[in-house]
Image (cartoon, grey):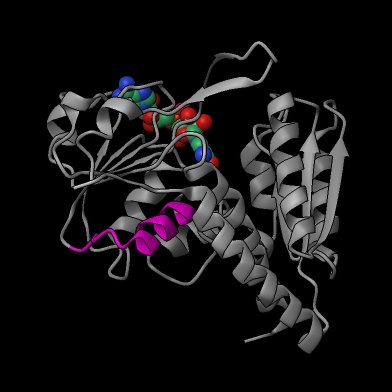
Amino acid sequence: MATKIISGTEIAKQIREELKTEVAEMKEKHGVTPGLVTVLVGESPASVSYVTAKQRTAHDLGFHSVQDNQPEDITEDDLVALIEKYNQDPAIHGILVQLPLPRHIEESRIIFAIDPDKDVDGFHPVNVGKMVIGEQCFLPCTPAGIMEMIIRTGIETSGAEAVIVGRSNIVGKPMANLMLQKREGGNATVTLCHTRTKDMAFHTRRADILIVAAGRPKVVTADMVKEGVAVIDVGVNRIGKTPEGKAILCGDVDFEAVKEKASAITPVPGGVGPMTITMLMKNTVQAARQISGIA
Ligand SMILES: NC(=O)c1ccc[n+]([C@@H]2O[C@H](COP(=O)([O-])OP(=O)(O)OC[C@H]3O[C@@H](n4cnc5c(N)ncnc54)[C@H](OP(=O)(O)O)[C@@H]3O)[C@@H](O)[C@H]2O)c1
């Protein structure tokens, strides 16, 4: 059986088309334009490129989009005050603060300051708590994007052995939670691996679905997976530069070797990455609907 290469780029394109139609309809029928602010503190090149991509996508979808750049030395109090301003702004439905923040700012205080109704990154504890108990909420964008990929590709999760490598708050932990929810894309038997896991290959070899978010280039090799596994590679590792100065990326999975055994696999780049931004847009549309009382 040929291996299916799951194109996040294609699935994201499909969802963006759906969102474009939805946004046009919201504007026409309800006079509501989804509004997204992205707050960038400092000028780290990676953060600048992420925020630029988010703004470009928001703009393409017809959002009201605001890019708010703040200096590296902004105080924590001033950043909280800025967020409170956007919490009150009726034209803004989604607030995204690009992480990581400079060391002198406590990230949790900033995340907690965002109105949970505008927390389109899904990091506020109110949304995290709702996700865990299966209530409607803003899901964190990367795990939400992975769920969309799994569902739209038709990968069977019910009763499957799902193994997740990585236990971060933004990927591994929410991913594990979503896969064990009692609903579409869930109902899996979930194992979560991390650096203290004794024999990781023992677990990964049992996986029907393997999701890897370790941030270590090619940490999953072909001998660590079974025939027919579906693999979602979340990792984005910069392993060098082209002569033109463009970053060379690779995932956490040895793509070329693992694809020979897998039934389906995501590439890097072009896999999970485009889905993350798209889910941010989807969350913003959802926020605009909820805040404006559109069913
Ligand atoms: N494509 C996207 O949109 C997107 C979004 C988010 C993240 N990412 C990428 O995904 C990767 C993970 O991101 P993250 O934020 O979750 O990273 P993170 O906060 O650094 O967490 C990495 C996790 O992987 C575990 N880990 C690391 N090396 C391991 C190993 N050799 N064996 C088993 N577990 C190991 C760590 O275990 P401990 O907890 O024990 O330290 C930790 O739980 C990164 O490459 C990141 O760039 C991509």
Q: Is residue 130 visible?
A: yes
* Residue 267 coordinates in the image, percent (x, y): 42, 37
175 left or right of 279? left
Q: In this view, does 76 lie to the left or right of 149?
A: right
- Locate residue 111, reporting x and y percent: 65, 47
Q: What residue appears at the point 71 percent right and 43 percent down from the top-left corner?
A: 53
Residue 136, x across and y down, in percent: 48, 72
> Residue 160: percent from the left, percent from the top?
17, 55
For the point 82% across and 26% down, which residue is it?
72
Part of the protein shown in magenta: 144-158
Residue 104 inside the magenta-drawn segment:
no
Give the quadrant of the C terminus: bottom right
Q: Looking at the magenta stretch, what is its main secondary structure?
A: helix
Image quarter for ligand 1: top left
- Measuring 52% from the left and 67% from the top, which residue is drawn there? 137
Name the foreground residue: 75 vs 268. Answer: 268
Does the magenta segment cover residue 145? Answer: yes
Q: Residue 192: which quarter of the image?
A: top left
Q: Is residue 254 above or below residue 208?
A: above
| Residue 140 visible from this viewpoint | no
